[in-house]
Image (tube, rainbow, N blue to C red):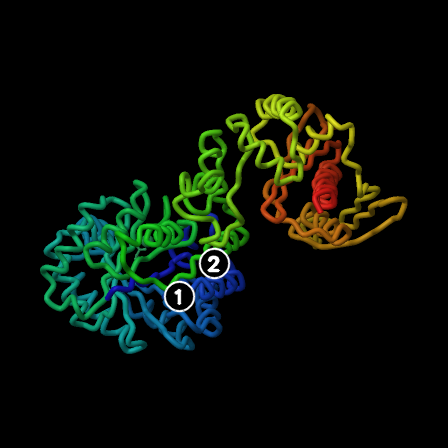
Amino acid sequence: MDRVYIFDTTLRDGEQSPGASMGPQEKLKFAKQLETLNVDIIEAGFAVSSPVQFDAIRMIADEVRKPVICSLARAVEGDITAAGKAIASADRKRIHTFIATSPIHREHKLKMSKEEVLKRAIHAVEFAKTFTSDVEFSAEDATRTEVDYLCEVVEAVIAAGATTVNIPDTVGYTFPTEFQKIISTLFEKVSNIDKTVISVHCHNDLGMGVANSLAAVHAGARQIEVSMNGIGERAGNASLEEVIMSMSVRKDIFPYEFGINTREIYKTSKLLIAIIGIPVSPYKPVIGKNAFSHESGIHQDGFLKERSTYEIMTPEQIGRPSSEIVLGRHSGRHGLKVRLKELGYELEAEDFDKVFVKFQELADKKKAVYDDELIAIMEENTGVQTPDIYEISQVQIVSGNNAIPTATVRIVQAGQVKQEAATGNGPVDAIYKAIDRIAGVQVELDDYEVTSISAGQDAMGEVSVTVRRDGKVYSGHASDTDILMASAQAYMNAINKIIYMEQKTK
Ligand code: KIV
Ligand code: ZN
């Protein structure tokens, strides 16, 4: 039992959180990525809750072969039957049935006695066993349940055949030392506990989801229920990336095996963001934009001398592009010198001093100074200008509530006209795809911002974009009364800088 099983509930608890709902095709796409990430169990949904949920689970059961495919079901026969039908085609299938055990839920929600809840739990497990041998039982709101009663319920459901028993901290109420004690008590008092896997499912209302899950592992839990990016009811669930990287970085404290391919973490997180459209905070551990960025001069200096001074894991471990030295107002001379060298400039001391002063002036005005802006500072000293390699001459858009957004973009390069059309998720996406086709440069759009720089109906809109290519960030800016035109020009501006810099540093 030195393996910790990873049960992913992004498609169930995660998907039921506000704004995170997904269609069956999107769920299937994400489930396939979870298979590549190598999670042990995918909780694909709550079959009885809607026909769309049912279909999504069925499609995942049909097509995703490696992980166990699971459906949630309340402890009632109708739910369990729907779950059993939805997962029927899976190679490995699980029904996850639950009932609340705490006095608050028994009294106010269920209006049931302890005895009635216990009877229902046993029957649910026995009934679920008629569909699959792999049955998980959850004692909802376990952390606010009388511990002796929790032990009684756990013992009874194991006797009824539950192969996994989950102890959820449904409302994110417990704390690591307390939760560890609850799990230890179960191991001490439940006579048949060795016949099941003890699982935990921790919500994040007080920011303890990951800490509580890991504390439970110390007490003997061997399944952790997690969601990608930590999405889930209210403040979300323990996040997969934090749980996994904690166990990976601190193997000395957590000497357990797990199946996750950590190099797929970043890709999985990005896919989820693209599907549900909910970004994560830049400060989010492991996957946030700043998680591997170093800005202060002292940190940059230390990191450049030996990366482990300020990094406990590498971005490569989770499949992210390399760490970033963000040049900004707190950066020092060492960081700037290294970056300029990477860009192909080695300056005499006197020239470097001049560039450093100009860099500081610019850094004082804005959040970060990107490579192309450094080049511009350099070129002000040598008089060379970044040429407009491509110039936009025309942008035509078809868009609207009944139209597939389509853009036709015409560009002039050295007197030659090039034209491409593309469709996209929206007009801006379509424009950017058409430009990508013409320029033949693949980039990742990191940021897109529109601001109004004058008032009234003919207000000028300013568009700023930052794009990423091979780990380097480039910016583009443009303004126009037509924000789609400004969007096109800002993007073109960034692409031109990439082409120019790549030619220059070849
Ligand atoms: O938070 C919870 O208690 C749940 C159960 C259904 C496991 O999501
Ligand atoms: Zn939950």
Please give the label number shown on residue 158. Answer: none
Which amino acid, by three-letter code, is at mark 2?
Glu
Q: In the rendering, at what x and y percent does residue 352 appear?
A: 63, 26
Residue 372, visible in the rendered structure: yes
Quarter of image, ligand 1: bottom left
> In this rendering, would 415 be left or right of 396?
right
| Residue holding disc 2 | 264
Q: Residue at x 68, y 28 (%)?
A: 377
Residue drawn 71% across the image and 36% down it: 483
In the image shown, does 267 or 432 lie closer to the viewer? Answer: 267
- Decide if ligand 1 comes within 8 Å of the CB at mark 1: no
| Image quadrant assignment for residue 137 | bottom left
Farthest residue in the right direction? 415
The residue labelled by disc 1 is 47
| Residue 382 figure quarter | top right
Q: Secondary structure at mark 1?
A: helix
The CB of the residue at mark 2 lies under 8 Å from ligand 2 = no
Q: Residue 394's spot in the image, x, y percent?
A: 83, 43
User: Can you tell which of label 2 and label 1 is closer to the viewer?
Assistant: 2
Whole-number angstrom distance, CA of label 2 to CA of label 1:
28 Å
Which secondary structure, mark 2? helix
Q: Decide: marks 2, 1 in contact (CB < 8 A)?
A: no
Instruction: Tell me if mark 1 has few (under 14), some (14-19) or many (20+) residues whose alpha carbon lies within 10 angstroms of its own.
Output: many
Position of residue 396 in the picture relative to residue 327 (left or right): right
Under mark 1, the amino acid is: Ala
Residue 491 appears anywhere in the view: no
